Amino acid sequence: MIQLGTVLGAIMSDIVKARRMADEQAVLTAESYRDEPLMEGMSVPRIRMPEVVVEMPVIIEEGTAGRADEQDTPENVAGKMSDSVIDAAAATETPIPRARRDELRTLLARRIEAERERAPRRVDPANRLFTARDDPGASELRAQPLAAGEVTRRASRRAMIDLERAKPLGLSDEARGAVREAIDRNAARAAIKRPGVAPSMMVNVATASMKESADPRSVARVKIVLREEGLAWESMGDGDDEGRMVLTPE
């Protein structure tokens, strides 16, 4: 057995490798054309794959419903977020006063707990495939709370506002910006104690298994359509600054 995602990933990876091999061959062909006077003016053939359609039979062996992220306690999250905020402000000329740091941690814990209680709920279809089979009495779609990272981000920003309203911290604009950036960057990671596991499906794709299957109805067919999209390196610098190279769609 193998995960369906692994099978699909292998197919896509092999198609990318095939395109690379074709491009390498096109380069070799171009060099040979250049060195041959009679072929020098001819166009060099290059293979493109604008669309690839793959159909394959699979036998679904089992499926797992996965597991949601396990949130950390408000106190632990508050400790991690306060450390991030304090470190961010300390890197500027106006750090958060030591006398206010315990107050910040307390406000963070209260705000995080309050935000979790009031966070809007949304329907999460992640377990749609397996809920009914594993627990016939359960609803097919389960309501899940708003993402823990977003709740933590909102709570942390509001805690900073509460701290400033109680008594101004005297932070510079640079420090305020650093604190906001630290909150946005660390909220999702700080909120989670143990990452969840995505739902998965185990399948059998061996041809021999298909032939041995007594009932053709137990064999499912998977069809995927892949479309080509090229990427090109582009410099993000301007003027004399070389900047950094990033991959952008062609």
Image (tube, rainbow, N blue to C red):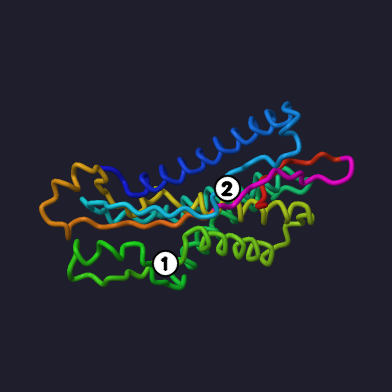
**Nearest to viewer (mark 1 / mark 2):** 2
Query: Residue at position x 51%, y 42% from top?
Result: 16
Give the quarter of the figure containing the N terminus: top left
| Disc 1 residue crowd, few under 14, some 14–19, many 20+, Cα 10 Å | some
113 lies above or below 182: below
Residue 22 on image: x %, y %: 56, 38
Q: Nearer the viewer, residue 101 or 131?
A: 131
Query: Residue at position x 36%, y 57% from top?
Result: 223
Q: Nearer the viewer, residue 23 or 61?
A: 23
Q: Which residues are magenta?
A: 228-240
The residue that mark 1 highlights is 145
The outermost residue toward the right is 240
58 lies above or below 143: above
Q: Nearer the viewer, residue 147 or 73?
A: 147
**Residue 48: numbered disc:** 2
Residue 137 on image: x %, y %: 18, 71
**Residue 197: numbered disc:** none
Query: Residue at position x 53%, y 62% from top?
Result: 150
Left or right side of 232 for 146: left
**Circle 1/circle 2 CB separation < 8 Å:** no
| Disc 2 residue crowd, few under 14, some 14–19, many 20+, Cα 10 Å | few
The outermost residue toward the front is 38
Left or right side of 123 for 185: right
Residue 191 on image: x %, y %: 48, 54
Left or right side of 62 for 174: right
How far apart in space, not on screen, are marks 1 and 2 (Cα)?
45 Å
Q: Is residue 246 magenta?
A: no
Q: Earlier in the sequence, mark 1 or mark 2?
A: 2
**Judging from the image, what secondary structure is the residue with disc 2 in?**
loop
Amino acid at circle 1: Pro
Query: Residue at position x 67%, y 52% from top?
Result: 250
Amino acid at circle 2: Arg
